[in-house]
């Protein structure tokens, strides 16, 4: 697998994680029976968690590809 193929896979995984998080947040907010102020706070909290999770996923994938590239697997 070439570097270009790995980059494409990494891009797809990251986009999937970001899009999935965004969709989940919107659906959760749409069906939540709460006031606007409370819903906005919940969305902000979920967004912070999604960013933190996405960063962790990105870091793990990046480390995986660097190890594979160096032949460490």
Image (cartoon, rainbow, N blue to C red):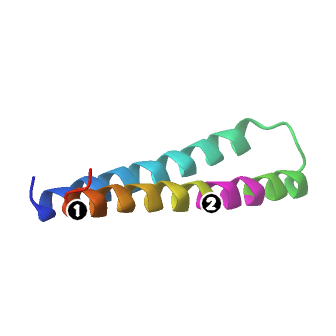
Name the residue that disc number 1 marks: 7
Residue 11 in magenta stretch: no
Where is residue 72 drawn, in percent x and y? 25, 55
Image position of 30 with respect to 6: above or below: above
Q: Residue at x 54, y 58 (%)?
A: 56
Residue 46 in magenta stretch: yes
Q: Is residue 50 left or right of residue 10?
A: right
Q: Is residue 35 left or right of residue 27?
A: right
Q: Looking at this view, is 16 or 71 the one in front?
A: 71
Dot 2 surroundings within 10 Å: few (below 14), some, or many (20 or more)? few
Q: Judging from the image, what secondary structure is the residue with disc 2 in? A: helix
Furthest residue in direction front, as rendered: 72
Q: Judging from the image, what secondary structure is the residue with disc 1 in? A: helix
Where is residue 7 drawn, in percent x and y? 22, 62
**What number is the disc on residue 41?**
none
Dot 1 surroundings within 10 Å: few (below 14), some, or many (20 or more)? few
**What number is the disc on residue 52?**
2
The CA span between labels 1 and 2 is 21 Å
Q: Quadrant of residue 53?
A: bottom right
Q: Is residue 12 left or right of residue 56?
A: left
Q: Residue at x 49, y 45 (%)?
A: 20
Where is residue 23 drawn, in percent x and y? 54, 45
Q: Quadrant of residue 10?
A: bottom left
Q: Looking at this view, is 2 or 67 the one in front?
A: 67
Q: Residue at x 60, y 61 (%)?
A: 51
Q: Which residues are magenta?
A: 44-51
What's the magenta bit mostly, secondary-structure-wise? helix
1 or 2: tag closer to the N-terminus: 1
Where is residue 13 drawn, in percent x and y? 35, 50
Q: Residue at x 75, y 60 (%)?
A: 44
């Amino acid at each position: 697998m070439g570097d270009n193929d790995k980059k494409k896979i990494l891009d797809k995984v990251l986009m999937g994680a970001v899009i999935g998080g965004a969709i989940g947040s919107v659906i959760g907010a749409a069906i939540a029976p709460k006031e606007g102020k409370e819903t906005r706070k919940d969305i902000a909290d979920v967004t912070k968690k999604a960013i933190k999770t996405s960063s962790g996923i990105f870091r793990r994938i990046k480390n995986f590809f660097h190890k594979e590239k160096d032949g460490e697997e």
